[in-house]
Image (cartoon, rainbow, N blue to C red):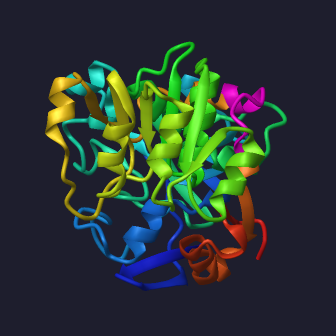
Amino acid sequence: MKALVLRGPNSFAVEDVEDPSPGPFEVLCKVERIGICGTDVHMVQGHYDMWPAYYPFIPGHEWSGEIVELGEGASEFGWEVGHRVAGSSHAGCMQCKTCIGGRYNLCLNYGKSGIHSHYGHTEQGAYADYVVHNIRSIFRLPDGMSYDLGAVTDPASIALHCANRGGVAAGDTVAVIGAGPVGILAAEAARSLGAGRVIVAARGARLSVVDEFGFEVFDTNTASGLEAFRKLAPLGADVVLDAAGTPYTVPMAIEMLARGGRCSTVGIPTDAVEIPMAPLVLDELELVGSRAVAGEMQPTLDFIADDRIRAGKIITHRFPLDEFARALEVTEKRIDGAMKVLIDMSNG
């Protein structure tokens, strides 16, 4: 099969590789669409020490496709050849304390091959004609849902998990920092969970994106950015969802919180972050991390299916696998207003 093979930082090519085969409780899927995640950009450029786990490596974890072969035992759980599915990246061991407690994204056996899989990070991913996944990390697409929407379900579920970690409740004032794909989807998730107001911090061309979705917005690229926010929400936000995760945005999120508020951050800073401790203590604020998903894939599919999460609106570009280098550049540099860039495996 054709696959994108990463052989080192900024060293990749589309190559012919051996077709994978499903093991027990796994399925082989024909990949139709794969979304380029911001994590993929960092992985390709060698910014993470932990990912990929080894070279050569096939990245990619936001995908949709069709089951073409069942591993032993998969049919016992109702899986059939021809089922259309969306993939999620974590397949926990389901035996450790955190997995049993429902937080399989924090599996204590993380990275142990044959026990735990983090597809596209520690196990081979989906920038390929075919991909193997454990049945614990695939979800059926609703009838009529496109492969495009299936491929953006993973980032949308990550956004929903971030909102859940933030404890978004009906009537809350929610602020979202970052108007990239996950930020916009986090705003959509907060709205779906009943937030009374959703205010998005953005800058540049992303300001118009927020307008298109109908959220309140303020410009962070001005000296009066936080002042503008305080005019919109004088008491602060009940919940801040930080989808940027930079040394600048985490302290800003704490400044934006109302007393007793909570910040959920999903971005992974590549530099050190200084946290202002005085307001954290004196205002009894909460700062929590949000990693991947822990049960949000199915509700996300339901939210997308009835348009409560308008995930399709973030898709801006499509490229064949052979043009991955260009697709990566468009993603990283936000060329032509790029938001979510898909690799279309049916094209080329």
Q: Which of 193 and 253 is in front in this view?
A: 253
Q: Nearer the viewer, residue 35 or 79?
A: 35
Residue 304 covered by magenta stretch: yes
Specify whether residue 198 is in view.
yes
Q: Position of residue 110 (x, y in %)?
A: 24, 44
**The C terminus: image quadrant:** bottom right
Q: Residue furthest top?
A: 170
Q: Position of residue 182 (x, y in %)?
A: 54, 48
Q: Which of 251 and 267 is in front in this view?
A: 251
In the rendered image, the vertical position of residue 159 relative to residue 101, given as above or below: below
Task: Identify which residue is drawn at 46% across, 65% down.
Answer: 40
In the rendered image, the vertical position of residue 23 relative to residue 279, given as above or below: below
> Which stretch appears magenta?
302-312
Q: Position of residue 226 (x, y in %)?
A: 45, 46
Specify whether residue 65 is in view.
no
In the rendered image, the vertical position of residue 31 relative to residue 231, given as above or below: below
Number of numbered discs on residues: 0
Residue 245 covered by magenta stretch: no
Q: Position of residue 127 (x, y in %)?
A: 56, 66
Task: Identify which residue is drawn at 19% across, 46% down.
Answer: 275
Q: Is residue 281 left or right of residue 55?
A: left
Task: Identify which residue is drawn at 29% across, 26% down.
Answer: 99
